[in-house]
Amino acid sequence: MQVVYSFGAVGAVMVAAAAGLVIGGSAWIAVVAYAGFAVFLAGFCYRVVQWAAAPVPFRVPTTCGQQTSLPWIKSAALENPSTTSGVLGRMGLEILLFRSLFRNSQAGLHEKRLILSEQKYLWLAALAFHWSMLVILVRHLRLFVEPVPALVVALARIDGFFQLGAPDFYVSDMVLACALAYLLLRRFRDPVVRYISQFSDYFALLALIGIAASGLSMRYVTRVDVVAVKQFALGLAAFHPVRPAALGAMFAVHLTLISVLAAYIPFSKLMHMGGVFLSPTRNLANNNRAKRHVNPWNYPVKTHSYAEWEDDFRAKLKAADIPLEADHATRASAD
Amino acid sequence: MPQELLRIEAKKPGGNWTDPAVQFRKGVFCYSAAAKNVRALDLPNPRDWQPFDADWKLPPDWKRILLEGMKERLEKYRSFRLFMDICVRCGACADKCHFYVGSGDPKNMPVVRAELMRSVYRRYFTLTGRIFGRLAGGRELTEDIVKEWFYYFYQCTECRRCSVFCPYGIDTAEITMIGRELLNLIGCNTNWVLEPAANCFRTGNHLGIQPHGFKDSLEFAADELEEITGIRVDVPINRKGAEILFVMPSADYFAEPHYYTLLGYMMLFHEIGLDFTFSAFASEGGNFGLFSSHELMKRLNAKVYEEAKRLGVKWILGGECGHMWRVLHQYMDTMNGPADFLEEPVSPITGTKFENARSTRMVHICEFTADLIHSGKLRLDASRNDRWRVTYHDSCNPARSMGLLEEPRYIIRNACHRFFEMPENTIREQTFCCGSGAGLGTDENLEMRLRGGFPRANAVKYVQEKHGVNLLACICAIDKATLPTLLEYWAPGVEVGGVHELLGNALVMRGEKPRTTDLRGEPLSAEVTHA
Amino acid sequence: MASSNDLVEQWFAQTLESFPDLSARFLAEEKDRFRNPVGHALHTSMAALLQEVLGNMDAGKIAPALDAIVRIRVVQDFTPGEAVGFVFLLRSIVRGSNPPRPAMIEARIDQLALMAFDQYMRCREQIAEIRANEIRRQTRARPALQRK
């Protein structure tokens, strides 16, 4: 059911994009893009501030290796960091290489055949998706910046290394498409993942697939007028939207989906892109006993003090010859 | 045909996790906390009730209390708010929970356990959830959900194994802890957590042993040690001016096989001439507050520093215990510190500074002993443990909340000859829980524990078959209480013991008589005795 | 007749139907015996049992295999009938494969079922016993407990 709704929602966005184009032309696209990014920026900041505003009362890292204790025991500097640099390393591994997800993976020999478990592909697909997405985003900078930064040019050149077809075929496009397809298939096929999947999960994937498909078709099939796109994009970036030549329905769909997805990010699990940096089980050093962590809302609690305890058990303590603080009750006995 | 009928009856559809109905079948849940224990701790809504009752006698405004409690905690714990928001449901954690692996119940997948809470969070605390409800993954908070929370949040041992595999470090233990804290607000708690907590609050320890009983226990242990070694060890209690305060889980002096670990500590302290004291007030290092609420944890933990300050010791040494060390390592200093009245711990025997404990000023006995062995201060005769073929179970909290992995192994390798590791995806940070931690270890919950403990026991059975392992060493009082039961069922023939029991067996003491038995009173083999 | 491997797979698959769908898939597909101890135990023990039913009916080999399966199912969410019912699934599977001497095989399956019931009861009794043992250990009569 969740899948159906998600398909419906993504379809509706596409229809709205096309309809908007017919009615409002490229001005409509500009409005959608600005609205989408405004919601994204405001929402994203709001959520991050909301997280950041919540204190971290306790230092609760999950330790995944040997602690730093005695000098002759080798500690796991990255899996169980006790220093800031170690934490940076751990976070780096986590964010750049998805270290924890990799832990899941298990390549094993089963009945003499090498089997990569299902989870290995999850790690691979997740990594492939996120990295190719980053490459594609950076490549897109060439549409928004003039002159195009050398880094972007270089990246595009590496990405188009195979120089197949015309225009050059980008490896990242292929990788992204495959990874997304795998991730979606996995949601459908794996009963465990299907069981836990919700509207939000399908919607995000389907929107991304829509974005990728429309982008790929513009590049390889319908061959959008790149000069016109760039003119439009530069205008958008400079807050001076220009009215370019017709960009086509595919472009409208592409940009609308991006805008809608961007606007959806702050309301969804896609916030993990910001949240991953803040996770207290990962971004704190396991130096708990070496450096005191302060809880800003620490408050006094009702305890049973030694004096009360001694009063409660004075006679028995005396009889057992256990040293006392005072020979007589210091308060009304509760015993 | 009859067999076809049977199959249809047995067929269990996976269903939909959003349906909160749970069945409280005897053997798979913990009984409610007795009113007297709830009262003893001044907690809300003391009453007589049981989870299988239809009416849980919740306070009339239970829903408001829960939602306000949730709001407060969302603002106080970044972990909670973040973990409510960022799960992408990738499924990496699904098969990492020992309860899921052992039971096949889908709601035991960590992601779903958390979704039980998340769905309510979405419905009441997010814009999309308030508008779109179920479509945005929201669930209305109902009494059935309270029951579901109770069932599944007391079916999580807060072992943190899932959080090792989560790409965002989402820790189900954090969610379970908050979940239990919320349930406590409306008086839904279990007796096996609150009775020890209430006892601990009053007398200082879980079983409610009073100071004279505490002393008798330790004296009795000294008597027994004298029989075994011919040496009379001191039992200092509440002694002011000692250099070190020693705090242990109370099970060490009343339960088996913990008791042999206590003998090990006492031998060690005597042999190295440690200037230390026990405390009848801080007679419990364990802290069942951890399984109930942060506040109760702090209330019960306070006595450790209070007693250290009163006695004027320099620093504190802590015995073998899992959840106790979770509290001591990750919470104590923050909650009840700073411990500026203590000194930075230095081993009086070796002069080693325990730099890693320079703020909290409490050292784990395994760190302390490993340093002694490494510095050559102990004479160990490992052959006295030759009847054991040992494997080591990493207890969840020392493994995943401290990283105390090598110290106990170092002691074991020095104290016995035959040590075998279990398979690597079942030890160290990937260790499987005993299935009875976090207040689940009660006998009425035995069947659930046997399910949850199966992955652990299965790995033990593997080394039993492969290497003839007959002793599982561990450094956790809950392990020592519950793993013998578990292994009796799943891997009979494997016993459970503490690391310092092995050390005690191997420790050659000055002036000791020839040992004829080990600490359990079992005869040492002839060749060892005459060696 | 179908190979005994095929029969084991059929038997295993039908037995897993007693679990929720998604768990059945996990139990069937995860091959690591430590990640999936339940699936591993069921599968290897069923293979051993089938071999005995079609072979020598060696009690020494049947007992541990049957024990491994029943022991797990006793503590899971099954009624006693569901817990041992997996044995009966074997009847239609074997019958469908046209074995030689079908009457003897069916009699053996019946025998296996009775053994499974016995084993189920033994496990139940053992649970009661280990529960009592645990309580005894946790209150090992140290003086502390005698002096309240």
Image (tube, rainbow, N blue to C red):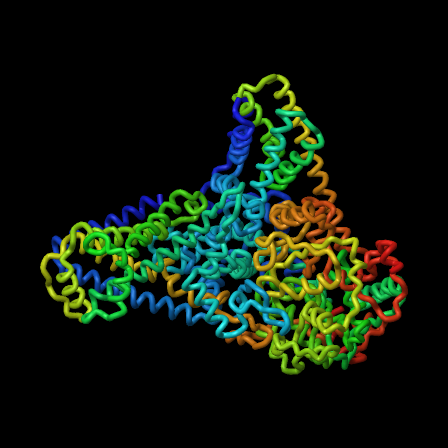
Q: Quadrant of residue C139?
A: bottom right
Image height of C4 relative to B33, above or below: above
**In front here: B340 or B53?**
B340
Q: Is residue B310 visible?
A: no
**In front here: B384 or B214?**
B384
Q: How many marks?
A: 0
The residue sitting at 66% across, 53% down in the picture is: B441
Quadrant of image for the C terminus of chain B? bottom right
Give the x, y percent position of residue C109. Answer: 63, 24
Left or right, residue A328 beside residue B286: right
Give the x, y percent position of residue A244. Answer: 10, 62
Left or right, residue B56 beside residue B245: left
Q: Quadrant of residue C58?
A: top right
Left or right, residue C17 beside residue B484: left
Give the x, y percent position of residue B195. Answer: 68, 59
The residue sitting at 50% across, 51% down in the picture is: A106
Q: Is residue A222 visible?
A: yes
Q: Residue furthest left?
A: A245
Image height of B484 relative to C116, above or below: below
Give the x, y percent position of residue A97. Answer: 42, 61
